Every structure is written in structure tokens, then in C-alpha cells.
Amino acid sequence: MSITTRRFTGSDADFALKTTLWNKAWPEYYRTEKIHRHDEETRNKEYYFIELIIEQDGTPIGMGEYMDDWDTDIDDDYFFMLYIDPDADFQAAANAFMNAMNADVASRGGKTSGTIMLENHEDRCQLLKDHGYTPAMREPRSELDVTSFDFSRYDWVDAKMADEKIEIVGLAEVKSRFADWQQRSYDLDWPIVSDIPTTVELKRQPFEEFIKHFSHPNHLVDGGYYAIDGDQLVGLSVVKAVDGNPEQLSVGITGVLPSHRRRGIATALKLETIKFARRYGAKIIKTDNEENNPMYDLNVQLGFKPKPALLIFEKNLQPQTTSEEA
């Protein structure tokens, strides 16, 4: 048995293959070929990004991709994803990919490497550990049954927002009020994103990259809600379409500026997205949060049910020195 890797070519056949392999390996995050093509067309070509197809005796059995992780403050920080056919030899396929990736990343002076894996795939998690990766963070996935949600438990929210003089409006209203709505959204985003628990310190996304979210195929104009205090955007909650499944939505982000927390604003925002989900016809809203994030607690209070968590694995690629060598 010969396991080899080759570069992804961008051909129609390779895009079709990528879509098939992704959905076999990550059915929880189903994606259509349209989304894969969109992401390829719109990704920032300034950042190093490699896709490898893994073949057994010439037959594709998996893929892997790795990239210089531009959104962290660590230079030469790499992130990779594996999507291997469940019927294939995962260990052999993963080893072939990781050997090729490691050699390339080492030649580029890579300092750290990371990936994600679902915790219920114990054999895959163990392989990562065997390669020197350690779990650095746990992010429980959770789902809300929209059809059975009881809004009567939150009949106090509208009066609370009125007392707080906070308006909850949709993105369309934000656009109509503020000519500079994209800049305002960008200014709101960073204080919220930078406060989300991570394993490394994040680097702010450039404005040009940020606004790409509004043209993504999964973006829903009516799925975004904002909290306004006077003329300031102080919070938001966004749900997105789930590729290929109109009965599901996923949470893009929910957050409130530190100055406006503990005032029920996040709850009010979340309720609006649940109302939207009902109108949209979705039965499920999906999300994931770091397990110690207060937003996870809020989701559980709202009725989100935990699912197997994502584990974030990391590895230091730099040689470790002893005290005598230092």
C-alpha cells in the first residue's frame, strides 16, 4: 500500500472531490461545492495556504490544508484541517499529510501549529497526541430546538430594554440609519472578538477582510440584530444560513461591549435571532463556545443542548532547550 500526497489543482474534479471528502469527514459542518469555491475565490492570497490531496495507490482517500494563521499575533503560527474518508485508514492518511506539512512548515521556520478535532473521535485525537499535539481548549457545540422554544419565559425583556434605553434593531435598520454602517460594525466587532477566550492573542482582522462577511453566500441580511444606545452600536447577534440545510442556522457571533454587559442585552439579541429562525423556517440553531465563556452559560439557559465538543490542539514546533542549553 502506497500513501502519497499531491497538490490540489483547483480543477472541477478536485473541487468535487474536496466537497465529497469534507462532507464525509465533517458531516456536522456540511458544505456545498459553491461554498468551497467562494472561499477559494475570496481568500486573501497574501497568506500562505496549501491544500494536499491524500491518495492510496492513486485513489483519493482524504485531504488536508494548512495555512499561516494570519489572525494571531504569533509570527509563523500555522493551522491545519484534515478531512479523511471514514472508510480509509485514518492513521496512514493523516501521517502522510502531516509528514508533508511538517517538512514544509519547518522549512518556512514555523513556530507553532494547531488544529481542531471533535472529542468523540477518540482515535483521531490520540493520533494528534502521538504527533505531539496537546488539547489547549475545549469548545462544546450546542443546538437549540427552535420549534419548542418558550418565549413566555422572557416576556420581561422588552420592558428591560426600554428601561435601559436600548434599541434592538435588524441590520437593514442599521444600514438605513448609518451611512457608515460597515465602519461602525467593524468598530463594534473587535472589542467583542478580542474578548472571546482563545489559546493565543488575536490580531485584528483588516477592514477589507471583515466586510467580506456581508457578501458571503451564507450571510442573511435579516439574520443580524444590533443593540443601539443613542447613536452607538453596543452589541450584536448574527445567525447564518447552514450550507445545504434550510432547516438549520448557525450562530456567527453574539456579543456586547464591556461597558454595556450585565444589562440583559445579549439575551434580548439572542431572542431576536430565535424569532428570526422561526420566520425563516429553521428547526435548529447551532453554535459552539469555549466552555468557560459566559455566552455558553447563556446559551444553556436559553435551552441549547450540548453536543460533543471541539478540541483545539496545539504544538510548539520550536526545539525545546534545557536550562543548561539556554
Image (cartoon, grey):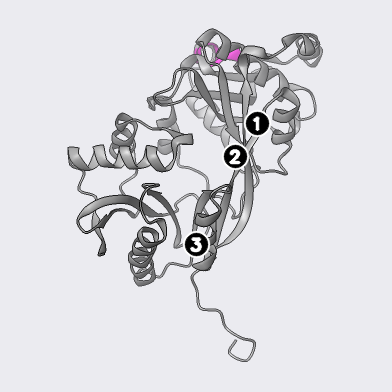
For marks 3 and 2, give the CA distance. 31 Å
Q: Looking at the image, is 136 positioned above or below residue 217? A: below
Return the mark for residue 193.
2
| Relative vertical location of residue 258 with respect to residue 95 in this rendering, above or below | above
Please say whether residue 170 is one of the residues in the magenta stretch. yes
Instruction: State yes or no: residue 280 in magenta.
Output: no
- The quarter in which the C terminus is drawn is bottom right
Secondary element at tag 3: helix
* Snapshot quadrant of residue 154: top right
The residue shown at (21%, 59%) is 57
Residue occupying the far bottom of the picture: 324
Residue 19: x and y in percent read 31, 37
Residue type highlighted by circle 3: Leu
Residue 219 x %, y %: 44, 23
Q: Earlier in the sequence, mark 2 or mark 1?
A: 2
Contact between marks 2 and 1 (CB within 8 A): the answer is yes
Crowding near pointer 3: few (<14 within 10 Å), some, many (20+)?
some
- Residue tagged 3: 127
> Where, by quadrant of the figure, is residue 89 drawn?
bottom left
Q: Is residue 236 left or right of residue 23?
A: right
The kind of residue on which mark 1 rests is Gly
Secondary structure beneath label 1: strand
Q: Alpha carbon of mark 3 to alpha carbon of mark 1: how far?
A: 35 Å
